[in-house]
Amino acid sequence: MTEFILRTIFWTLAIYGFIEIIKNIMYILTYTKFQSDGIYVIIAVKNQEEKIEGFLRSSLFKILYGKEEYLKDIIVADLKSTDNTKEIAKKLEMEYDCLKVTSWKECKDIIDNINDN
C-alpha cells in the first residue's frame, strides 16, 4: 500500500514538472521572440549617499529575480554628486554584471549610440 502511495506521488510530481517545462518553453517562444537589444533602465542620482545602496539593491532584486528577461542593462548616471554616492554605486557595479555607473555625459553617449534595429 505504501509503495502505491509513493508511486502515485512520484508520478504526480513528474507530470506536474513536465507541464511546467512545457509552460516555460511556450512562454519563452511567445514573449522573447521579438526581443532586440533589450530594455535599458537609467537611474539618475545626485547626493543620495544614504539611500542609493538600498534603492539599487531592492531594484536589482526585483528585476533579477523577477521575470524580466528583456532587461539588458541598468545604468546609474551620477549628476556630479558632492558625497559618496558614486563610490557606493561603483561598489555595487562590481557585484552585479548588469549594473553600469557612468557620468551623465557618458550616459547620453550610450543612449545616442544604441542601435536602432
Image (cartoon, rainbow, N blue to C red):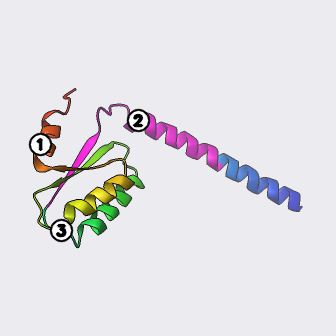
- Residue at left 10%, top 45%? 105
Q: CA distance from mark 3 to mark 1?
A: 21 Å
Q: CA distance from mark 2 to mark 3?
A: 40 Å
Describe the element under mark 3 as helix, strand or loop.
Answer: loop
Residue 32 shown in magenta: yes
Q: Position of residue 109 (x, y in %)?
A: 13, 38
Which sits earlier in the primary sequence, circle 3 or circle 1?
3
Closer to the camera, 109 or 41?
Answer: 109
- Residue at left 23%, top 71%? 51
Compared across the picture, whether 42 is left or right of 5 comes to left
Q: CA distance from mark 2 to mark 1?
A: 33 Å
- Residue 28 disc label: none
Q: How many marks?
A: 3
Mark 2 is surrounded, within 10 Å at the Cα level, by few (under 14), some (14 to 19) or many (20 or more) other residues, namely few
Which sits earlier in the primary sequence, circle 2 or circle 3?
2
Report the mark closest to the observer, 2 or 3: 3
Task: Tell me whether circle 2 and circle 1 mark residues in contact (CB < 8 Å).
Answer: no
Residue 92 quadrant = bottom left
Residue at the extreme bottom of the image, as rendered? 50
Q: Position of residue 114 (x, y in %)?
A: 19, 33
Query: What amino acid type is highlighted by mark number 1?
Result: Lys
Task: Tell me whether circle 2 and circle 3 mark residues in contact (CB < 8 Å).
Answer: no
Q: Which residue is mark 1?
A: 108
Q: Which residue is mark 2?
A: 30
Residue 38 shown in magenta: yes
Which sits earlier in the primary sequence, circle 2 or circle 1?
2
Q: Position of residue 39 (x, y in %)?
A: 26, 42
Instruction: Please state, as top left, top right, bottom left or bottom right, where the N terminus lies in the image.
Output: bottom right
The residue range painted magenta reads 16-45
Closer to the camera, 8 or 57?
Answer: 57
Q: Which residue is mark 3?
A: 48
- Residue at left 11%, top 66%? 82
